[in-house]
Image: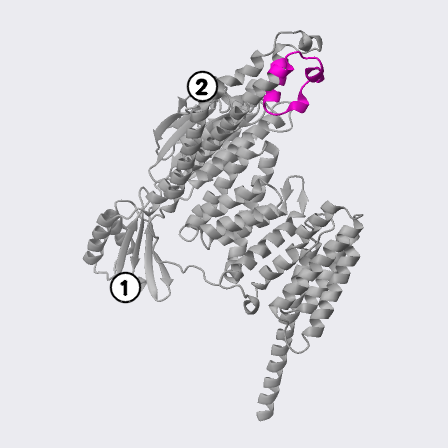
Amino acid sequence: MDNIRTEGQAKRNLFASLAGKITADRQALMSGAISFFLGMCSLIEGVNPFGITMLSAAGKKLNAFFVGSVLSSVFAGNMAIPVAAVNIVVYIIRRLFEAKKPMSVRSRVVIASLSALFLASIRYILSSRQFYVAAESLIYYATIPLFAVLYMGLNRRDAFLGKGHREAGLLAAAFSMTVVMTGASYGYFSLGIVWATGLTLLAAKKGMAAGCLTGFVCGLGCFDALLLPMLGLCGLTAGLIMNSNRKTAILAGGGVATVFAAVTSELPKFVITDSALWLGAALFLLAEKAGADKLLFDEMNDGVLVDKDCDPRFQRIAESFSSLATVFFNACETASEKTAKLAIPLKQCGNCLGCSVHGLDEDENNLKLSQLLRGERKRMPKHFEELCPNSAKIETAVAESSDITGSAQMKRIAEQYLDFAKIMECVAEREAERTEPLPEKEEQVKAALDEMGLSYDKVTVNGGRRRKLEVIGITPEAVCVTTTNLRYNLSKAVGTMLGDPQFIQIGDVSVMRMETVPAISIEYAQTSGAAGGERVNGDSTSVFESEDARFYALISDGMGSGPAAASSSRLTAIFLEKLLEMGAKKEESIRLLNKLLIAKEGEIFAGVDLAEIDRVTATATLTKAGAAPSLLIRNSTAHLIQSSTPPAGILDDITAEQTKVRLKRGDIILMFSDGVIGSADKIPLWMLTIIESGKYTSPAELAMKINEGAKRAYAMKDDVTTLAIKIV
């Protein structure tokens, strides 16, 4: 028997030893891979500092880091041999000095600094001793000792800069890996954006400061001036509420980033950048599920039993943006008295025939002078410098009015700050409604629980139109009434219809949660087709539901047909979807969309047909701007809903018309692009025949019949899109 036990113990020891070795080998493989990929990354041509940096900073797995760094040196171009040689020398020195004890952090920093000086000198020599190359090399190779110090913070034993050293190391690692991922790019799409967004949202779990700083650092690693503030705003906004409402935080952060990208970039880049942004949000969810946040952060905020009061920081940030906007607007008003000087350069012209002789009419000449005013002198016609007798007067007038362009720039900045302030105010209002405490309802719930003979420790009721009840300290076994009676009594106390109770165990505490049940459900279907001769449908649709049970259906009809119309409609759909998901109001969203389209180069118009269905209150609001009429079908009778508002992108200011409807089960809302119904004052006879026949069993069948009817009636002269929504 003793022999059997000894043999079993030996097997267990063997398996444990093998498992430990496999784990160690896996860690070594991971270390080598990290060193290799970081070493591949170049800041500029021939400058690949991160492999040597990792080798200098490494506390453990030195062999793995060395192999990865040496292999990556082949990507250093004409610096490949010097980089490989430095890696070998650093490895040998560390092995010699660490024969008995680990090398001190100061010694490793000295080695990193000497490596940087040597490589900078070699690059200077290879460049035929050009001075600017020497300065450039010193600046870029200075990252070796700098990042070596930062990377040491990732190892607790080497973190010699105090409490913040680990956080600094994480930021350095985030920057380095973002630079690596940015290398995998195709056109406007870059894996760096996906990676940077995921890291930014992970950091936002530590708060808005961590999220904002990580966003800026990762944006810097993407080498794109647009991404630096975009990701910073994403991290800042998401960090405000990440630990109280994760879904809203992701939508708010991504929504703000989407708005910024839409305002500051052209359409093709915006669409691709925004797609990469939301892929990054998906990456964050996967990383969070895998426990990456616990691996990166030592101390995460503990889960709370109930939601905290609405965080006032949203409102404070909104007030800050609003105050900044006021400052810039005031500066614009101070300079506005000088705006009359804008016309001065144009008034100095017209005294000779020089421009007309060279083929420029008056309008074209004014355009050229406007370009001069904007500082684009190189685009002026050649005869302006050589032959124009009024060139001196024009140059003087331009100099006098040059400060006006600064005023216009300040006004644009002020408007953008004000727009962000309004978005934050919308999110703050939505959060305030969701977390609003209802003490009167809490007392009524306590009375109902006492009447049913149920014991509890604490009761909280929060929310406005959709309420949430939590009863702490109650267990399923202690509930001595039926679920139906429990729902009825507590719904009566809360003032809204509640769903079935859910019991959650948090530590040693049991919590019963009940939430408002939506009054209606929704079925929907959509069909579409491109105009004759076109391969792309110029209409875009978007159907989604917000966290607070608001269902949205959107048809964006780009003016005309084909790829150009599809691009403008897609921009409209993406922009509105992200704003509405994060909690912005419909009116504010369409106003911002209108400003966005006007600001874009060229003529970009889009009709907007938006239906918001509140599933809690069973009401619908149809908002239209240059959109085709919609239909409300009730008891097989169709009611026309129209609007005379022009499309977004035409007028400087736009107020979309809204129609509110109280819904009933069985109602159907039909939304169309103008290729289906046009802008008729009455329902087409062929469509009325389909609706009144009642020969359809689902929204999908009805939408298909209507689209087929439109194709027969109008011979596909325009894109056709039909969206059918049924209330059940």
Q: Foreground: 479 or 466?
A: 466
Q: Quadrant of the N terminus?
A: bottom right
Circle 2 residue: 683
- Quadrant for residue 8, please give it: bottom right
| Residue 391 within the segment the image draws in magenta | yes
- Whether residue 712 sits left or right of residue 688 in the image: it is right
Where 676 falls versus 57 (above or below)?
A: above
Where 714 falls versus 525 (above or below)?
A: above
* Dot 1 amino acid type: Ala
Q: Quadrant of the C terminus?
A: top left
Circle 1 residue: 478
x and y, in percent, of residue 259 in the image: 50, 36
Colouring chosen for the image of the structure: one colour
Tell me what residue is drawn at x 55 percent, y 29 percent.
569
Q: Is residue 507 visible?
A: yes
Q: What is the magenta range?
A: 365-393
Q: Residues within 10 Å of mark 1 (few under 14, many from 20)?
A: few
Q: Foreground: 491 or 602?
A: 602
Tell me what residue is drawn at x 52 percent, y 35 percent.
574
- Quadrant for residue 151, please give it: bottom right
Query: What is the distance, in whole Å, between disc 1 and disc 2 at their CAs?
Result: 60 Å
- Whether residue 597 sits left or right of residue 65 in the image: it is left
Circles 1 and 2: CB distance less than 8 Å?
no
